[in-house]
Image (spheres, rainbow, N blue to C red):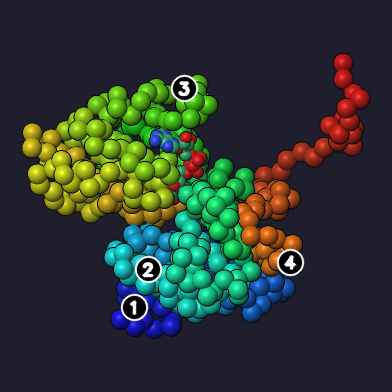
Amino acid sequence: MTISTRGDVKDITLAPRGKDRIEWAAKDMPVLRLIRERFAKDLPLKGVRMSGCLHITTETANLAITLKAGGADLVLCASNPLSTQDDVAAALVSEYGVPTFAIKGEDKETYYRHINAVLDHKPNMTMDDGCDLVSTIHTTRTELIPAIIGGMEETTTGVIRLRSMERDGVLKFPVLAVNESDTKHMFDNRYGTGQSAIDAILRATNILLAGRTIVVSGYGWCGRGLASRAHGMGANIIITEVDPTRALEALMDGYRVMPGIEAAALGDIFVTVTGNVNVIDRQHLERMKDGAIIANAGHFNDEINIPELEKLATTRRRVRDFVEEYTYADGRHIHLLAEGRLVNLSAAEGHPASVMDMSFANQALGSEYMLAQAQELQPRVYTLPAELDKEIARLKLRAIGVRIDTLTPEQDKYLNSWESGT
Ligand SMILES: NC(=O)c1ccc[n+]([C@@H]2O[C@H](COP(=O)([O-])OP(=O)(O)OC[C@H]3O[C@@H](n4cnc5c(N)ncnc54)[C@H](O)[C@@H]3O)[C@@H](O)[C@H]2O)c1
């Protein structure tokens, strides 16, 4: 099948609604707005061919507008088959002139056809959320490598994949791990995933969280956010972990900590946010209560062993949008949300614009930095310089009208000297 170079979207007539929603998100993205205004004057990305594989949301559209303002020649595809907002994809194509290849619910074949369509753009720079562009380039599109200056990576799972490529000596160009900036993971992963994953569970099921037991697997940035938000709404939290320090932190934050197999029998709702595989496996699924709800907010849909769930069930049916009910032979019902894919982006709208403002400020400034440093960088995984990270925090505080103290010369001297003490 051939697809137009302008993109492949579900329904171009959805564009006006997408534009309204993109403008709504823009109101809560003041840092990106400041960057856009400067980019429009300085054109730091002039003529750079960029291919992005990101969740196609209102916030990503604002990043795209910013990169274009900076002079980039940009095309986009989805980084997950279920996360695309079809009205936004339509608006990107028809209102903002960004060729976009993304349809909510696309099958795996279409997903990879879209990835290859954005690679046909012959990028000088890639922008990934999960490393699918970089891994496709390194496996089946190696002819593109000589023209690539570098890439940007948005999420934890993508950074893990890239570090493993670096370790194996196969990474062929530098990549900036945007996820590692404080102004990314401390806010996007924690407050963004924390709130939007709960938003999605509520939209999909409309259940009351108060009094329910929620099992959160993984107490990293996302898991901490999810646990604290759910706790705030009255849920009892159980954490499962494999890292002793994180498990201890969860315990001292006031939650119960236990092995997954024990939690399996106690939970009403289960959410995985580990970036790992089969965290909810057959033995957990076998022990769950009638009515249990399972969701995943980690990057890939392999945190829950869905093939085993299918084997355990005698029947399955869709009972609500994004809710699949599996019935076991003994009559128990288990509910899987959003096919085990990123629940917050599938059954809700993903992170609020206010946190994506900082994540995408990192992407925009990171791409400018990558270009400026092109000669210096090796084929490795880099993080953004700490000054850029702090600058984003400073701009965000200023935009929301919060002032902080500055060091006095005396304090600065004190902190930089080893001679002062008792
Ligand atoms: N839904 C979203 O919008 C969104 C946003 C950001 C990140 N993510 C994804 O969420 C996942 C987690 O990201 P993070 O930044 O919190 O990572 P993180 O590394 O900070 O935390 C992951 C935690 O999971 C734990 N873990 C690993 N295997 C486990 C297992 N078998 N059982 C229990 N715990 C286990 C690790 O010890 C770690 O503490 C990644 O896949 C990331 O890409 C999703």
Disc 2 is placed on an element classified as helix
Give the residue at x 51% y 71%: 142
Marks 4/3 in contact by CB < 8 Å: the verdict is no
Q: Position of residue 132 (x, y in %)?
A: 45, 61
Viewed as shown, does residue 70 lie left or right of 408?
left
Q: Give the quadrant of the N terminus.
A: bottom left
Q: Which residue is mark 4?
A: 375
Q: CA distance from mark 2 to mark 4?
A: 31 Å
Sequence-first tag of 2 and 3: 2
Sequence-first tag of 4 and 3: 3
Sequence-first tag of 4 and 1: 1
Q: Give the quadrant of the C terminus.
A: top right
Q: Which residue is mark 1?
A: 13
Ligand 1 occupies quarter? top left
Q: Which residue is mark 2?
A: 112
Q: Is residue 259 above or below residue 353?
A: above
Q: Amino acid at mark 1?
A: Thr
